[in-house]
Image: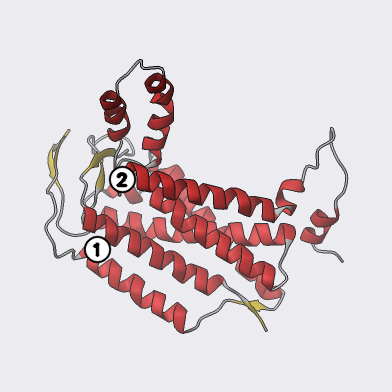
Amino acid sequence: MDSIFARIDNYNHTVFGLDPVGAVKNVRVWRRYLAALVVASVVGWAALGWESTWNQVSEFFQYLPAFLSRQISLGAFDVKVAQYYGVGQHLSTAVIYGVCFLVLSIYLEKINIVKSMNFFVAASLSFMSIGIYEIVYNILYSSFQGQSWAFTLGGHQMFNLVVFYVFILVGVLTLFYLYTLHYRPHVGKLTLFFVGGSVLTYVLWVFYPFATTVLTVQTSVGFWTSSHLFPQTMYAININPLGHGGNGVPYSVPNFFLHFVNIVNKALVSLLVLSFTMIRKK
């Protein structure tokens, strides 16, 4: 019996002239799009700054027409874009996860996992990597910075945590499916190197030995002050701890080397998962 992926790949019917499953079969097209996104993220990262974010990109394109039509000055344009520096998802994140997806997809193609199965496996295992990193991050942030809302299934954070758990679940189920096809996760010297590097950078981040800016925020129950353990370049603070659920208000505290530690840590954890999921057939 053909697998679901073989059926998808062999499906040739159209609906209103469109192939409803064509997108998942053309994994090479997805790789081109994602490669373009990675390149654009690198360019944006270089242009907008070390801790640049997608919020800045949004502001850039929102106010670019006004700048080009001379409705606002260059200085005003810079202020609009810079106001979200360090706030939101960093461009470096898109670079790291995008590169890992591309490497995994190309590797899977080389071991004859192609078309729709390639797309599904590469995507689900890449999302699993994101889920693992974010769950660990939220546990550490909640524990060391006294922001319990970050790892609580309530309020706005509930959606985020459920999504991360779903990412992990889908990835684990994908590995089980691959196991039934006699594919096994890979644990080699490089995998162990990434394990060690991930642990070391987590320890360095939690017990960060260099100077950081102490942030104090007024909340509904008094003042919250950042901890020296697991310091951040962007804090999300619940300013109403007694309210239902919780939602973090962002505060940017730029720190070049601390952000470097964050990037290296995320890259190492992502490479660890990538190395583990570069499956071998037994």
Q: Which mark is residue 11?
A: none
The residues tagged by marks 2 and 1 sit, at their Cα atoms, a distance apart of 21 Å
Residue 76 in the image, given as x and y percentages of width and height: 27, 24
Determine the residue positioned at 35% across, 15% down.
71
Residue 201 in the image, given as x and y percentages of width and height: 29, 68
Quadrant position of the C terminus in the picture = bottom right
Quadrant position of the N terminus in the picture = bottom right
Mark 1 neighbour class, 10 Å CA radius: few under 14, some 14 to 19, many 20 or more = some
Question: What kind of residue is marked 2?
Answer: Gly
Please determine whether, in this image, residue 133 is positioned above or below residue 32: below
Query: Upstream in the sequence, badge 2 or badge 1?
Result: 2
Determine the residue positioned at 72% across, 74% down.
181
Q: Which mark is residue 205?
A: 1
Left or right of residue 274, residue 251 in this image:
left
Question: What kind of residue is marked 1?
Answer: Trp
Left or right of residue 223, residue 158 in this image:
right
Q: Which mark is residue 49?
A: 2
Please determine whether, in this image, residue 66 is positioned above or below residue 264: above
Which quadrant of the structure image shows residue 84? top left
Q: Is residue 13 visible?
A: yes
Determine the residue positioned at 42% across, 47% down.
43
Q: Which color scheme did the rendering employ for the protein?
A: secondary structure
